[in-house]
Image: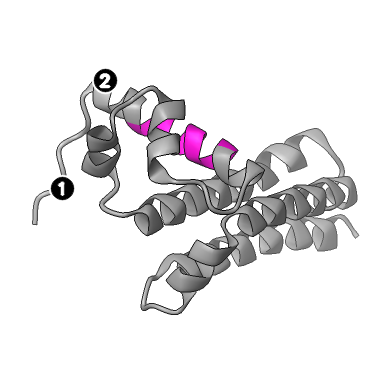
Amino acid sequence: MSSPRPLRADARRNREALLTAAREALLAEDNVHVDEIARRAGVSIGTLYRHFDTREVLVAEVYRHEVEELCATPARLLDQHAPDEALRIFLLLLVEHAAVGRGMGEVLESIMATDSPVYNDTRDEMACALDELINAGAAAG
Protein backbone atom coordinates (compact mmCIF):
# COMPACT_ATOMS: atom_id res chain seq x y z
CA MET A 1 0.00 0.00 0.00
CA SER A 2 1.44 3.38 -0.95
CA SER A 3 1.47 6.30 1.44
CA PRO A 4 -0.63 9.35 0.59
CA ARG A 5 1.04 12.09 -1.38
CA PRO A 6 2.25 15.01 0.72
CA LEU A 7 0.04 18.07 0.64
CA ARG A 8 0.97 21.01 -1.56
CA ALA A 9 2.17 24.04 0.40
CA ASP A 10 -1.13 25.93 -0.03
CA ALA A 11 -3.19 22.89 0.99
CA ARG A 12 -0.96 22.39 4.04
CA ARG A 13 -1.44 26.07 5.01
CA ASN A 14 -5.22 25.74 4.59
CA ARG A 15 -5.29 22.60 6.73
CA GLU A 16 -3.25 24.25 9.47
CA ALA A 17 -5.45 27.37 9.31
CA LEU A 18 -8.54 25.19 9.67
CA LEU A 19 -7.10 23.31 12.65
CA THR A 20 -6.08 26.58 14.33
CA ALA A 21 -9.46 28.21 13.69
CA ALA A 22 -11.30 25.12 14.90
CA ARG A 23 -9.24 24.94 18.09
CA GLU A 24 -9.82 28.61 18.87
CA ALA A 25 -13.54 28.39 18.07
CA LEU A 26 -14.01 25.22 20.10
CA LEU A 27 -12.30 26.81 23.09
CA ALA A 28 -14.65 29.78 22.87
CA GLU A 29 -17.93 27.93 22.32
CA ASP A 30 -19.25 24.38 22.36
CA ASN A 31 -21.39 24.29 19.25
CA VAL A 32 -19.53 26.30 16.62
CA HIS A 33 -20.69 25.60 13.06
CA VAL A 34 -18.25 24.47 10.36
CA ASP A 35 -19.17 27.52 8.24
CA GLU A 36 -17.85 29.73 11.03
CA ILE A 37 -14.66 27.69 11.32
CA ALA A 38 -14.06 27.99 7.56
CA ARG A 39 -14.72 31.74 7.71
CA ARG A 40 -12.26 32.20 10.59
CA ALA A 41 -9.66 30.16 8.69
CA GLY A 42 -10.16 32.32 5.59
CA VAL A 43 -11.17 29.40 3.37
CA SER A 44 -14.34 28.18 1.72
CA ILE A 45 -16.56 25.50 3.24
CA GLY A 46 -15.57 23.29 0.29
CA THR A 47 -11.93 23.56 1.34
CA LEU A 48 -12.87 22.55 4.87
CA TYR A 49 -14.69 19.48 3.58
CA ARG A 50 -11.82 18.54 1.26
CA HIS A 51 -9.62 18.23 4.34
CA PHE A 52 -12.20 16.94 6.84
CA ASP A 53 -15.19 14.86 5.71
CA THR A 54 -17.33 15.80 8.71
CA ARG A 55 -17.32 18.12 11.69
CA GLU A 56 -16.56 15.10 13.88
CA VAL A 57 -13.45 14.28 11.83
CA LEU A 58 -12.28 17.90 12.23
CA VAL A 59 -12.85 17.88 15.98
CA ALA A 60 -11.12 14.51 16.34
CA GLU A 61 -8.12 15.86 14.42
CA VAL A 62 -7.98 19.00 16.60
CA TYR A 63 -8.07 16.78 19.68
CA ARG A 64 -5.41 14.42 18.30
CA HIS A 65 -3.20 17.40 17.41
CA GLU A 66 -3.58 18.82 20.93
CA VAL A 67 -2.58 15.49 22.49
CA GLU A 68 0.41 15.12 20.16
CA GLU A 69 1.67 18.58 21.11
CA LEU A 70 1.18 17.87 24.79
CA CYS A 71 2.89 14.50 24.62
CA ALA A 72 5.89 15.98 22.83
CA THR A 73 6.67 18.26 25.81
CA PRO A 74 8.24 15.86 28.39
CA ALA A 75 11.64 15.66 26.67
CA ARG A 76 11.81 19.44 26.35
CA LEU A 77 10.67 19.93 29.94
CA LEU A 78 13.24 17.44 31.22
CA ASP A 79 15.97 19.28 29.30
CA GLN A 80 15.01 22.54 31.01
CA HIS A 81 13.88 21.48 34.49
CA ALA A 82 14.42 18.97 37.26
CA PRO A 83 12.11 15.95 36.91
CA ASP A 84 9.74 17.04 39.70
CA GLU A 85 9.35 20.52 38.19
CA ALA A 86 8.96 19.04 34.70
CA LEU A 87 6.14 16.82 35.99
CA ARG A 88 4.46 19.78 37.74
CA ILE A 89 4.56 21.84 34.52
CA PHE A 90 3.30 18.90 32.48
CA LEU A 91 0.36 18.41 34.83
CA LEU A 92 -0.54 22.10 34.46
CA LEU A 93 -0.42 21.65 30.69
CA LEU A 94 -2.66 18.61 31.10
CA VAL A 95 -5.24 20.73 32.93
CA GLU A 96 -5.10 23.26 30.09
CA HIS A 97 -5.59 20.41 27.64
CA ALA A 98 -8.71 19.34 29.53
CA ALA A 99 -10.18 22.77 28.78
CA VAL A 100 -9.78 22.07 25.07
CA GLY A 101 -11.60 18.78 25.59
CA ARG A 102 -14.49 20.55 27.33
CA GLY A 103 -14.84 22.90 24.38
CA MET A 104 -15.34 19.88 22.15
CA GLY A 105 -17.41 17.94 24.65
CA GLU A 106 -20.48 16.96 22.67
CA VAL A 107 -18.58 15.90 19.57
CA LEU A 108 -15.93 14.05 21.57
CA GLU A 109 -18.69 12.15 23.38
CA SER A 110 -20.14 11.07 20.04
CA ILE A 111 -16.69 10.02 18.84
CA MET A 112 -16.23 7.99 22.04
CA ALA A 113 -19.49 6.16 21.31
CA THR A 114 -18.11 4.94 17.97
CA ASP A 115 -15.23 2.62 17.18
CA SER A 116 -12.92 5.59 16.60
CA PRO A 117 -9.36 4.87 17.71
CA VAL A 118 -8.89 8.50 18.81
CA TYR A 119 -9.24 7.85 22.53
CA ASN A 120 -7.21 4.65 22.62
CA ASP A 121 -4.40 6.24 20.62
CA THR A 122 -4.34 9.44 22.65
CA ARG A 123 -4.61 7.61 25.96
CA ASP A 124 -1.59 5.51 25.01
CA GLU A 125 0.37 8.63 23.98
CA MET A 126 -0.50 10.32 27.28
CA ALA A 127 0.58 7.25 29.27
CA CYS A 128 3.95 7.22 27.49
CA ALA A 129 4.48 10.92 28.20
CA LEU A 130 3.69 10.45 31.89
CA ASP A 131 5.90 7.35 32.06
CA GLU A 132 8.80 9.35 30.67
CA LEU A 133 8.42 11.99 33.39
CA ILE A 134 7.87 9.49 36.22
CA ASN A 135 10.83 7.36 35.14
CA ALA A 136 13.05 10.46 35.03
CA GLY A 137 11.90 11.36 38.53
CA ALA A 138 12.56 7.85 39.83
CA ALA A 139 16.02 7.86 38.25
CA ALA A 140 16.76 11.20 39.91
CA GLY A 141 15.67 9.80 43.26
Residue 56 seen in render: yes
Q: Amino acid at mark 2?
A: Asp
- 60 sits to left or right of 78: left
| Foreground tag (1 vs 2) | 2
Where 117 sits versus 4, above or below? below
Question: Which SS class for mark 1?
Answer: loop
Magenta stretch: includes residue 138: no
Residue 83 at x, y percent in the picture: 84, 49
Q: Which mark is residue 129?
A: none
Q: Earlier in the sequence, mark 1 or mark 2?
A: 1
Mark 2 Cα-neighbour bin, 10 Å: few <14, some 14–19, many ≥20: few
Residue 121 at x, y percent in the picture: 46, 66
Marks 1 and 2, Cα distance to the nearest angstrom?
20 Å
Question: What residue does disc 1 label?
Answer: 3
Where 13 sits versus 5, above or below? above
Q: Which mark is residue 10?
A: 2
Quarter assignment of residue 79: top right
Magenta stretch: includes residue 19: yes
Count of numbered labels shown in the rendering: 2
Where 11 sits versus 122, above or below? above
At 89% from the left edge and 46% from the top edge, which residue is drawn? 85
Quarter assignment of residue 28: top right
Q: Which of 5/95 is in front?
A: 95
Q: Which residues are magenta?
A: 15-24
Residue 42 at x, y percent in the picture: 38, 22
Magenta span main SS: helix
- 85 sits to left or right of 40: right
Q: Amino acid at mark 1?
A: Ser
Question: Which SS class for mark 2?
Answer: helix
- 99 sits to left or right of 63: right
At 8% from the left edge and 57% from the top edge, which residue is drawn? 1
Residue 106 at x, y percent in the picture: 54, 65
